Amino acid sequence: MNTKTDWLALEKWAANQWPPEESEALGHWRLRASGGFTKRANSVLAVGDFPAEPDWYERICRFYRDRGLPAAFHISDSSPPELDLMLEDRGGIVTAPCFGMIAPAAELNARLRPHRDRTDVTAELLASPDPAWVEDYMLLEGHALEARFFYEGLLERMPAPKAFVRMLSRAGETVALGTAHASGGRAIWSNVIVREDRRGRGFAKALLAHLAAWCSDNGARSVFLQVLQDNAAALHLYESAGFKPEFRYHYRVMQ
């Protein structure tokens, strides 16, 4: 996958797996709002050509102003080339540069399969998150209490089939969590987190091994994920599992 058309289709598909509370189409673009929780759910998915409306920028600013949010744009290799510079000239600030990474599902399974056999952790796979899974996720990510309502809604809105994986120690302690969704031969991973005081012990690869197995069992030929460019530990983990960066994106937040 190395063409703009491929990236465009993938980005739109991936955006559907993180559904916002509110969405409005503007030509090829999509305006997303969710009370300010997460940039993915509170930004313009600005992929594809510019909107035909001459006042598109004013319309976007009004959409977010009416919701008490700053106008923010998801800008990637699929966005119009002029857009980023245009927003920079208007005072937009770059934040959260990310990679979109892809791996063949079969290669992931081959590399990660040995890590499924660990005896010091047990994997639980849920078709929907129970309250304990949500509680563990909020705790491990360090999210504020007021964000819980958003995440409960987000996890419910995520399209099926989906899997919520919990890795438990022998003592019954949650050491890692992750989410997967598969459709149309693709899969996406999100919400991958390892308890901070258990990192560096291989639990992440055990988690990924079970996510990879679920994706293959659900017909995925490739797996996609998004990761911050400055997260060196996560990049090393994913590259060692077989992922490669395919494209870049960032957010441009207007001041």
Image (cartoon, rainbow, N blue to C red):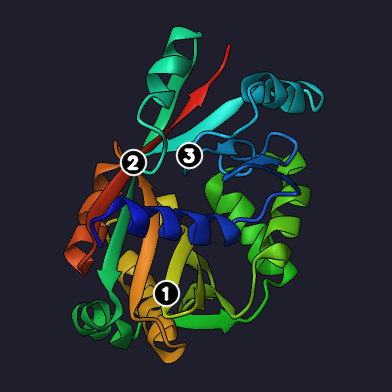
Residue 52's place in the image compared with 231, above or below, is above
Residue 56's place in the image compared with 77, above or below, is above
**Which residue position holds label 1?**
186
Rendered location of residue 27, percent (x, y): 62, 42
Looking at the image, is mark 2 or mark 1 earlier in the sequence? 2
Looking at the image, is mark 3 or mark 1 earlier in the sequence? 3
Rendered location of residue 66, percent (x, y): 82, 24
Q: Quadrant of the C terminus?
A: top right
Q: Quadrant of residue 60?
A: top right
Q: Residue at x 23, y 57 (%)?
A: 2
Rendered location of residue 244, percent (x, y): 21, 58
- Residue 150 visible? The answer is yes
**Which residue position holds label 2?**
77
Mark 3 residue element: loop
Mark 2 residue element: loop
Looking at the image, is mark 3 or mark 2 earlier in the sequence? 3
**Which residue position holds label 3?**
49
| Disc nearest the viewer among 3 and 1 | 3
Rendered location of residue 31, percent (x, y): 66, 39
Of the pair 82 and 33, the residue shown nearer to us? 82
Q: Residue at x 29, y 63 (%)?
A: 102
Cα separation, mark 2 vs mark 1, equals 20 Å
